[in-house]
């Protein structure tokens, strides 16, 4: 991987291993990444809501509602964290493997397969500030006219040029192996 892409790989919290036997692209969970910090805040908030509903709840309805709402926040947070930890795409000499939800999908490589790159800017508004722009990069495998999202990452908009270059590089690495 080129030296100029090392920083954006680190910023995007991914790792890339390209050897003769396989190409492996994985998400990494970094605690102090801006996106992960928000999810951890959501997790702690859900746990706090459950705890407060049991300790300070005066009636059964407040205990049940606090527990359900806090439980939803905890489950959602854990889902996002686990998904990020296990997200990967691996291309070997004869197959491509990737996570689709919580299932590993495996396809034998053939020359009809295509890789598609999508770039999208999202705006997340906030009441306490002006909001934030994020750049989403998604890689899709097109096999028998069916599209599968095989990998994605997200960075701040200020890194969008570098993220786009990284997306193109990752797509070209996968295309070379197909």
Image (cartoon, rainbow, N blue to C red):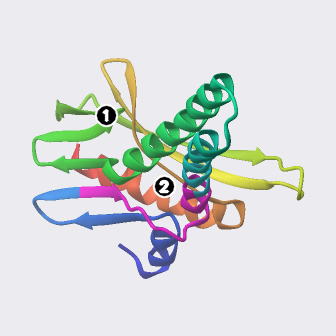
Foreground tag (2 vs 1):
1
Front residue (pair 133, 36): 36
Q: Residue most toward the front?
A: 58
Residue at (57, 29) in percent of width and height: 68
Q: Which residue is mark 1?
A: 102
**Residue 120 relative to residue 78: left or right:** right
Q: Residue furthest top?
A: 145
Residue 103 position, x and y percent, is 26, 31
Q: Position of residue 100 (x, y in %)?
A: 33, 33
Q: Nearer the viewer, residue 110 or 1?
A: 1
Disc 2 marks which residue? 167
Q: Where does residue 177 sit, x and y in percent of width and height?
A: 22, 49
Reply yes or no: does residue 113 show up in magenta.
no
**The N terminus sits in image quarter:** bottom left
Using the rendered image of the protein, determine whether residue 110 is visible from the camera's viewpoint: no
Quarter of the rendering occupied by the C terminus: top left
Label 2: how many Cα within 10 Å (few below 14, some 14–19, many 20+):
many
Q: Nearer the viewer, residue 116 or 9?
A: 9
Residue beneath the point at 25% across and 66% down: 17
Q: Is residue 20 visible?
A: yes
Tell me where residue 62 sits by quadrant. Answer: top right
In which quarter of the view is residue 73 placed? top right
Quadrant in the rendering for residue 150: top left
Q: Would residue 17 appear left or right of 75 to someone viewing this image?
A: left
> Which residue occupies the foreground of this view, 176 or 69?
69
Cα separation, mark 2 vs mark 1, equals: 23 Å
Q: Which residues are magenta?
A: 24-40
Percent from the top left, x then y, of residue 34? Answer: 61, 64
Horizontal side of 99 relative to 12 (left or right) equals left
Secondary structure of the residue carrying tag 2 is: helix
């Amino acid at each position: 991987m080129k030296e100029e892409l090392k920083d954006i790989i680190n910023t995007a919290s991914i790792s890339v291993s390209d050897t003769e036997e396989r190409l492996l692209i994985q998400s990494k969970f970094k605690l102090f990444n801006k996106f992960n910090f928000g999810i951890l805040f959501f997790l702690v908030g859900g746990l706090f809501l459950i705890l407060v509903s049991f300790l300070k709840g005066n009636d059964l309805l407040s205990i049940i509602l606090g527990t359900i709402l806090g439980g939803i926040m905890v489950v959602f947070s854990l889902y996002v964290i686990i998904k990020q930890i296990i997200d990967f795409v691996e291309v070997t000499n004869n197959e491509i493997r990737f996570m689709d939800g919580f299932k590993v999908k495996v396809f034998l490589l053939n020359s009809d397969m295509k890789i598609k790159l999508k770039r999208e800017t999202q705006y997340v508004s906030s009441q306490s500030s002006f909001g934030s722009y994020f750049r989403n990069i998604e890689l899709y495998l097109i096999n028998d006219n069916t599209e599968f999202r095989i990998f994605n990452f997200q960075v701040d908009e200020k890194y969008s040029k570098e993220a786009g270059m990284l997306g193109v590089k990752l797509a070209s690495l996968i295309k070379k192996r197909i």
